[in-house]
Amino acid sequence: MIGQLIGPIANIAGGWLQGKADVKAAEAKLKLTEAEAKAKIMLSKETSIADWERIMAQGSQNSWKDEWLTILFSIPLVLVFLGDTGRQVVADGFAALETMPDWYQYTLGVIVAASFGVRSATKFFGRK
């Protein structure tokens, strides 16, 4: 009689334990799938950024844009070494730039960012 009761109870307990194990396995599989998906997204994002930067670098190989901006940004640097008159010209110029509309100032920032690399420039502008 006891043997007849133990068999079904053992089956119920075994089924319950198997169900718990199946739930744990499904949870682990879900976490693994989520981690793999996140890794794919991050890889895709980094690949896209690298591809965009490569394309931009190839496009600017025959361009004077970077050189022009470097010369333009060097003018105040040179002027400050020409005495009080040069420093006054630079100070007046930057004061005048501060009065420009925000959209103009941001546009200048975008132009520089596009020319010299968006990621490094946006880090610089983010410190403002």
Image (cartoon, helix red, strand yellow):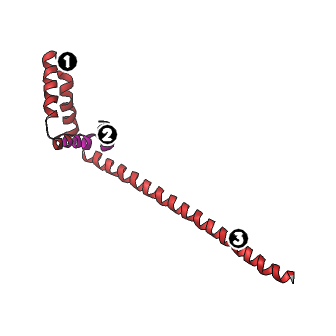
SS assignment at label 1: loop
Residue drawn 35% across and 51% down?
51
Q: Disc number at residue 17?
A: 3
SS assignment at label 3: helix
Q: Disc number at residue 89?
A: none
Residue drawn 17% across and 22% down?
79
Question: Which residue matches tag 2?
Answer: 126
From the top left corner, tell me how far across and down residue 24 is, in percent: 63, 65
Discs 3, 2 touching: Cβ within 8 Å: no
Residue nearer the viewer, 57 or 116: 116
Q: Which amino acid does label 3 sit on?
A: Leu
In three-dimensional space, the C-alpha distance between marks 1 and 3, rounded to whole angstroms, equals 82 Å
Q: What stretch is highlighted in magenta?
A: 106-126
Q: Which of marks 3 and 2 is in front?
A: 3
Disc 2 or 1, which lies upstream in sequence?
Answer: 1
Q: Which of marks 2 and 1 is in front?
A: 2
